[in-house]
Image (cartoon, rainbow, N blue to C red):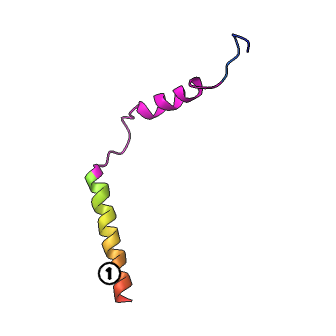
C-alpha cells in the first residue's frame, strides 16, 4: 500500500472515543441507582397488573 493512503483502522474510531469521553455541561445527569430503582418499580407494576388481570 501507498504510505499516504489512509486504511481506516484505528483512526476511524478516534472521533467516537473523543465524542463519548466528552461531557456536556447541559446534559441531564441521572444517578445510576435511580435508573435501576425505576426499572425495578416498573417491573413490579407490570407483574402486579399481570396478576390482577
Give the residue at x 29% y 50%.
32
Q: Quadrant of residue 5?
A: top right
Vertical position of residue 15 compared to residue 49: above or below: above
Q: Which quarter of the image is occupied by the N terminus?
A: top right
Q: Which residue is mark 1?
A: 48
In the rendering, at what x and y percent does residue 26 appear? 38, 38
Give the residue at x 36% y 35%.
25
Give the residue at x 34% y 86%.
51
Most extreme residue toward the front is: 1
Vertical position of residue 33 compared to residue 2: above or below: below
Give the residue at x 73% y 12%.
2
In the rendering, at what x and y percent does residue 9 appear? 60, 26
Q: Quadrant of residue 24?
A: top left
- Span highlighted in magenta in the image: 8-32
Vertical position of residue 40 compared to residue 48: above or below: above
The secondary element bearing badge 1 is classed as helix
Vertical position of residue 40 compared to residue 10: above or below: below
Most extreme residue toward the right is: 2
In the rendering, at what x and y percent does residue 52 appear? 34, 88
Q: Which quarter of the image is occupied by the C terminus?
A: bottom left
Q: Quadrant of residue 50?
A: bottom left
Residue 17 is covered by the magenta coloring = yes
Amino acid at each position: 500500500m501507498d504510505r499516504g493512503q489512509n486504511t481506516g483502522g484505528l483512526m476511524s474510531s478516534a472521533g467516537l472515543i473523543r465524542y463519548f469521553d466528552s461531557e456536556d455541561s447541559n446534559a441531564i445527569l441521572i444517578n445510576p441507582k435511580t435508573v435501576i430503582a425505576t426499572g425495578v418499580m416498573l417491573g413490579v407494576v407490570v407483574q402486579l397488573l399481570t396478576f390482577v388481570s
